[in-house]
Image: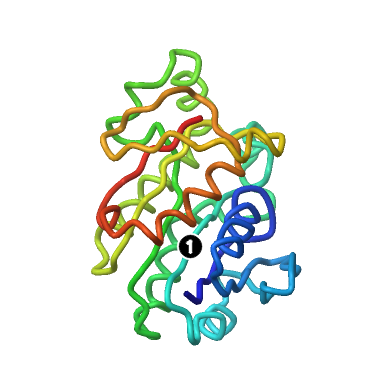
Amino acid sequence: MKVLVVGASRGTGAAAVTALVRDGHEVTAFARTAAPTSENVRAVTGDVFDPDALGKAMIGQEAVVVILGISDNPFGVRLFGRARTPLDVRSEGTRRVIEAMGANGIRRIVVQTTYGLGDTFGRLSLPLKLFFRAVLAPQLADSEAQEAVVRGSDLDWTIIRPVSLTDGTPDADSAPAHVDVHDRIEGLQVTRGQVGRVHADALRHDDWIGATVSVSG
């Protein structure tokens, strides 16, 4: 399958690219600082807010994986506002991706948000609840809006909600993540490599279409 990964330059985005390539997909990595990671990856430098760049990257694709976020320090964002990335990058960026998909006849989309949205907030530990409310409120509001954009589309969507992300060792990254479509988790941390694997798995799971998948370690 030809798959476009939007937000592919680092972290979970890069891990998703690696997992997709291992599964034999033809991957286009779209990011503001895109760089090819293997001969099976086409790197496209562009901004999700640039309709021309995004539209060109969509041509010929069969599925899209969206992993958008703000890399700035969250305390700095809360105190002083975003430094480089628009605060609505998740919701508005995803809306633009969906528009470009419609223009190109692409239906399958996998979008990463975060565990702790909606009803899952009540399942967080008290320290995480306090951190979410005190520090991450703007980002979480944008993620809530992002999920609404996805659910309001007529696409074949899957939402991936990982718990707190960590950088793992190769052994940790290769361990299967716990996935659940009923909000259940088995821990409050998961590696970016594990989540990248789940993004690739989502393209094989037609039963995940229209589902929100919680991912934990």
**Residues packed near mark 1 inside 10 Å, few (<14), some (14 to 19) or many (20 plus):** many
Residue 60 vs 4, above or below: the answer is below
The x and y percentages for residue 81 are: 61, 43
Q: Is residue 44 visible?
A: no
Instruction: Name the image quarter holding residue 34.
Output: bottom right
Q: Is residue 122 left or right of residue 200?
A: left
Which residue is found at the position 34% from the left and 55% from the top? Answer: 158
Foreground of the two, 198 or 214: 198
Tell me which residue sits at (43%, 47%) in the image.
142
Q: Is residue 19 placed above or below 174 in the rendered structure?
A: below
Residue placed at 38% from the left, 27% from the top?
Answer: 185
Q: What's under tag 1, amino acid-wise?
A: Val
On screen, residue 120 versus residue 77, left or right, reads left
Q: Nearer the viewer, residue 115 or 152?
A: 115
Q: Residue at x 52, y 22 (%)?
A: 131
Residue 126 visible in the picture:
yes
Instruction: Check disc 1 and report its element: helix, strand or loop.
Output: strand
In percent of width and height, residue 20 lies at 56, 62
> Percent from the top left, x then y, of residue 121?
35, 27
- Label 1: which residue? 65
Residue 179 x %, y %: 39, 38
